[in-house]
Image (cartoon, grey):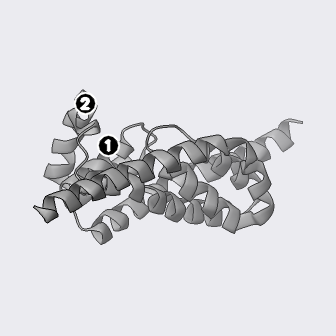
Amino acid sequence: MWIKYRQTIYRILSLVFVVVISLWVYSIKDQTEQLKAFGYPGIFIISVLANATVILPAPGIALVYTFGAFLNPLIVGIVAGIGSAIGELSGYLAGYSGQGIVTKTAAYEKVHPFVEKYGGLAILLLAAVPNPFFDLAGIASGALKIKVRVFLFWCVIGKIIKMLIFSYAGALSIDWLKNVL
């Protein structure tokens, strides 16, 4: 009986954690400009926080694009990709805790079998392309009890690919603007 109560407490704490992180990151979104002064560590922190939200969107990709224009886009993409993957652990934890709120949505019902069937490849693919469903993939990964190291491995690769694309897009756009002006 105590195990059931303990699981319920863990589930509630996980949900509260995800909601609090999401609300906090959303509330400080205008202050991310100040983190630019911190260079690569600032990019890392922004990426972790922007991807730790499960409910509200945060401007992580736009900032990677901007940073790529002013700093080394290769390093920006790698640092942002690693930070993004770490931030995605919030969705993974929500799924691992067994929360049933999101798992009853139609979108989750489409993502869950994909992650269940293809595992790491699904995580990589969904992490590499900009889409609103990656949080659901993280939740599905946690619910399926995919090992956290496996989730992080594929997530890091996918997020680095995505962030490199945005970082280099930012760098190339600045070069293009310099040539045009």
Residue at the limit of the structure toward the top, as seen here: 106
On residue 105, which mark appears?
A: 2
Residue at the limit of the structure toward the bottom, as seen here: 149
User: Do the numbered discs 2 and 1 sit on residues whose CB atoms are within 8 Å?
Assistant: yes
Which quarter shows the C terminus? Answer: top right
Position of 60 relative to 181 (above/below): below
- Residue in view at x 58 percent, y 65 percent: 79
Rendered image quadrant of residue 129: top left
What residue does disc 1 label?
A: 136
For badge 1, the amino acid type reads Leu
Left/right placement of residue 171 relative to residue 128 reads right
- Residue in view at x 74 percent, y 51 percent: 69
Q: Position of residue 145 (x, y in %)?
A: 19, 61
Which quarter shows the N terminus? Answer: bottom left
- Residue in view at x 85 percent, y 43 percent: 178
Q: Disc 2 or 1, which lies upstream in sequence?
A: 2
Position of 90 relative to 23 (above/below): below
Looking at the image, can residue 164 be seen? no
- Residue in view at x 23 percent, y 28 percent: 106
Left/right placement of residue 164 relative to residue 10 reads right
Rendered image quadrant of residue 102: top left
Between 87 and 169, the one lying in front of the other is: 87
Position of 1 relative to 181 (above/below): below
On residue 163, which mark appears?
A: none
For badge 2, the amino acid type reads Thr
- Label 2: few (<14), some (14–19) or many (≥20) C-alpha neighbours in 10 Å: few
Q: Position of residue 103 (x, y in %)?
A: 23, 38
Q: Position of residue 148 (x, y in %)?
A: 30, 67
